[in-house]
Image (cartoon, rainbow, N blue to C red):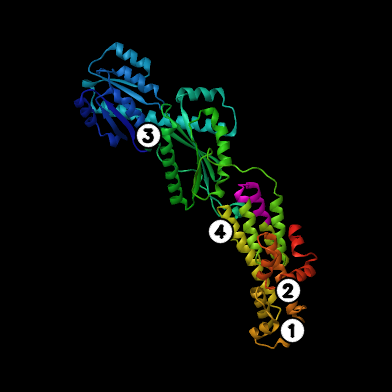
Amino acid sequence: MSTDLLKVILVDDELLAIEHLRHLVPWHELGFEIVAETTYPQQAVELHRKHRADIVFVDIKMPGMDGLTLSRALLSEAGGTKIVLLTSYKEFDYAKEAIKLGISEYLVKHELSADQLTSLLRIMKDELLKQDHKERLIRRQLFLDLVKGVKPLVEQKRLWAENMSTRSQFLLMLIGVDLPVGPFSSTHPYAPPSQLQLSDEGTYEGIMCFDAIQLAPCRWGIIATVSEKGGYSHFQPITMSIIRDIQQRFKRETGETISAVVSSSLYTLDEIKHRLMLYERTLAYAPFYGREIVMHPETVIFGEDRDIQEAKDHLEAIRRNQEHLDYSGAELIAAAFELEIKRLHIKGVYWLGDKLLNMIHNFRAARNLPLPAQERCENYTFLEMSAHLQALYRENVQECQKLEYGRYSRKVRETLHAIDTRYSEGLTIEELAEQVGISGDRLRRTFKQETGTSALDYLTQVRIREAKKLLQLEKYKIGEVAEMVGYRDSQYFSQVFRKAVGVNPLMYVKRGGH
């Protein structure tokens, strides 16, 4: 029911009678709007289905369909519409039949005054508003119980039968605020509204009423009661329009976005609980796809609940890289998330996110580095979570390298940086010394004194470390790896690799990078 104007339809085979009634009282001032008029009673039912009128004024004698027949058809529709019969003269039989049908009022046209109609409209308005409030309370309590899995009481069923159509069907929608995923949800300073603002149900043809049930602080179930005459092919575009309107309104009022799950069919009361459970599961997959989306359970592929051993293996490899201050650990984070996302493995993605964030924070704590400032997080999808964790990882490596390099003189720091960035070139001590502006002998002596190892040994360590990462990818031949890390002779590379690792490159690959 509209919160502004109650809707009225006028039905009379005489156009002058309709015009007289339309001008008899100031309808808008009294809180009413004439939404439709017709001289053809056969059109009245369709007009009522379209507009869901609160009151229908019906002439009792019309060709093709009399007022009583039309009233029966209108009253068979769900919605609690009030019928006012109009006649040119009093007839007891008509009045008696009208009472039997449950028609609200029986008026004689030539006796009807503006004052009489005004008084009647005010009484009906009060009754309609009370009835609307009562129906909403009944529906809301019933829906709440159904969502919780509580079996409706006999009294609830009786009230439902008395006040609603037992043949009503329902469109279901689940609305959820888009929040940061995984371990970042707590960084979102969002206070959800206590109520979800919905459009007037009269905006949408065939929608009798809306009910929004808050299922959690940031999630609502919306149940739209529809005429049993409709089908999903009729309501599908209407449903999408409702969702888009809610999304736009919510974003405008709160600055937040929401995603939704919508039904692809109409449901009965008994199906509501089961369907909402399916919608909850569907909405949990929203971070795989994006923000402000509309999902259909029938088209969502649910990932299998599989073992997380591969995620554990990735985590251990990332940990080792972090301990060695190796930037390529960020690439391993990306690869780990890519695998779990491709599988739609929701358990694996969340596990990975939690463990990685803990590992990154523990790494900082062990080195007395301050934790990152708690800022509003924008990780609404799993890909965004992956990118954020990669950035945190790189920040760890960068800060630790600064601390580590800070212990050394400027010449040694420049040498370390040159080796870290140019290891794939055929570097010599003389080239490095020339780059930093000192002699080769002085560089050898200074580097050894400050780092405890020779510059050549450090260059070898970097090359072997990078070679191991390339070999683990299993994409390159041994000779290609040798050249990529700065060795022009693959045989010599194999000898150096074996001395450093304990096995030759080929055996290292066969053992799975161990």
438 or 72: nearer the viewer: 438
Query: What's the distance in space between the residues labelled 1 and 3, CA to CA?
Result: 85 Å
Q: Position of residue 239 (x, y in %)?
A: 44, 38
User: Badge 2: how crowded within 10 Å, few (<14), some, or many (20+)?
Assistant: some
Residue situated in front as seen by the camera: 184 or 449: 449
- Distance between mark 2 and mark 1 Cα atoms: 15 Å
The kind of residue tagged 3 is: Glu
**Which of the two discs, 1 and 4, sits closer to the camera?**
1
Which amino acid, mark 2? Thr
Near-viewer residue (273 or 472): 472
Rounded to the nearest angstrom, the CA distance separating label 2 from label 3 is 75 Å
Q: Is residue 232 left or right of residue 479?
A: left
Q: Which residue is mark 3?
A: 205
Q: CA distance from mark 1 to mark 4?
A: 48 Å
Where does residue 300 sit, x and y in percent of width and height? Answer: 55, 41
- Return the residue at label 4: 376
Q: Are marks 2 and 1 in contact (CB under 8 Å)?
A: no
Which residue matches tag 1? 444
From this view, report whether residue 324 is shown above or below residue 96: below
Q: Main secondary structure of the magenta part?
A: helix
Q: Is residue 485 above or below residue 145?
A: below
The secondary structure type at the circle numbered 1 is helix
Q: Amino acid at mark 4?
A: Arg
Dot 4: element: loop
- Quadrant the C terminus occupies: bottom right
Counting residues from the start of the chain, the first of labels 2 and 3 encountered is 3
Q: Is residue 344 magenta?
A: yes
Q: Nearer the viewer, mark 3 or mark 4?
A: 3
